[in-house]
Image (cartoon, rainbow, N blue to C red):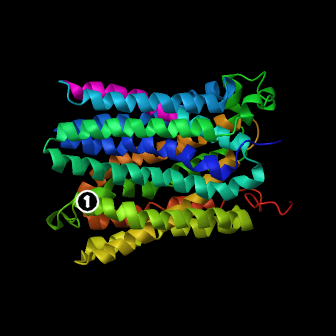
Amino acid sequence: MKTDNTPWFWIPLLNFASGLPYAIIISVSVIMYKNLGISNEDIGVYTSLLYLPWVIKPLWSPFIELTGTKRKWFLSMQLLISIAFLLVGFMIPVNGFFMMTLAIFWVAAFASASNDIASDGFYLLVLPKEQQSFFLGIRSTFYRLSMLAGNGLIVLFAGYLEHKYGDNTKAWSYTMIAVGFLMALITIYNFFSTPKTEINAVENKETHHDQNFGSVFASFFRKKQIGLVLAFILVFRLGESQLLKMLSPFLLDGKELGGLGLDTEAVGIIYGTFGVGALTLGGILGGIAISKQGLTKWMLPMFLAMHLPIIGFILLAFFHPTSIYYIYGVVILEQFGYGFGFTAFMMYLIHVAEGESKTAHYALATGFMAMGMMLPGMLSGYIQQFLGYQNFFIWVFIATIPGLILSRFLIFPKDFGKKSEEV
């Protein structure tokens, strides 16, 4: 089958278009509302609810699986997200902006979750199976790069405008309008760069011709080892889900509160420069490693690479180094380990989705993954307040052990993910 474009041409920005909206809706919105005078209580409750679409997206994934093409779905959703971000920017100066912008973010969140479903399905359908493990590292890297662009560069841009205008409302209004235009440009690029092969791929429909929503869901829960599989998906990121929520507060909180006392610009620089480089290298090497030797060989090393860097944060919490270079070192190690190790988890989710209804089954798997991120993350603030940063990071490290134990009992083909030697 002839394809329109090489994967290198369309995979990076297609995955960037999945991560950027997520970063803006879930993370940047918290900083924005904080700077616009919204209380911590309201921020915590309402921005946590914005995460729900990613948890429940399997409920409408069969609809995307069985109607239209994946390409039409993700292009229309990306356009909707672009419009939503522009509207948020225009609504910020208006009285009662909080609830209005939350409603728009809610629409954008559902569009973003739908975009994820369609993009994942497009990748599984269009890219040959033997290439998927190699490009998995590229996918995860550019998804994570988009998160860092949102959490780092966009926040730095807003901070620059705050200093320039001395008006947080104007600064964040302009920032969100700029993000809306950026998302629109990415959508236009994806329109021209993504292969159009899938539009005429009738075989994609034949498999599902007589299927309904119920059979798609039921077939997922009939998969081999499904109980163990779901338990593993839910606890694999048990430690990381709590770490990610409390990492920025740890870096920003004063030393009298147990934090490191960095300013916002320093945090943005750490994750926007050194973190990006380490993450990129880790993700690329992770994809190459699995494509050469398969998932079985690399599951344990990648799990350890992803979670052992937590020890670095334990040391930072206990010793509070005065030199920022120690902090750089820990962040670089953590980002490299994340990029390298998360590749194995994504590859395993592809294995879970194997068979009929790949798109819906992959969405189900990632929905359970999102639940495993959301619930512990919601409790992480309370746990940190109760334990303090030092004991919190020790707890986070301990929380990685259940995933390690369960990973040893998973069954999948020995060479799964290994690139075929055939030309």
Residue at 24% over, 29% down: 98
* Prevailing secondary structure class for the magenta stretch in the rendered image: helix
Q: Residue furthest right?
A: 422
Q: Is residue 280 above or below residue 11?
A: below
Identify residue for label 1. Answer: 265
Residue at 57% over, 50% down: 12
The N terminus, quarter of image: top right
Q: Position of residue 128 (x, y in %)?
A: 76, 48
* Amino acid type at image mark 1: Glu
Q: Position of residue 400 (x, y in %)?
A: 48, 62
Q: Is residue 99 magenta?
A: yes
Q: Position of residue 394 (x, y in %)?
A: 36, 67
SS at circle 1 = helix
The C terminus, quarter of image: bottom right
Residue 47 located left or right of residue 146: left
Residue 40 in view in this figure = no
Residue at 53% over, 57% down: 141
Range drawn in magenta: 96-113
Residue 176 located left or right of residue 339: left
The image quadrant that residue 65 belongs to is top right
Q: Position of residue 361 (x, y in %)?
A: 66, 38
Residue 357 in view in this figure = yes
Q: Is residue 12 above or below residue 49?
A: below
> Is residue 193 or residue 317 the one in the foreground?
193
> Is residue 28 or residue 215 the one in the foreground?
28
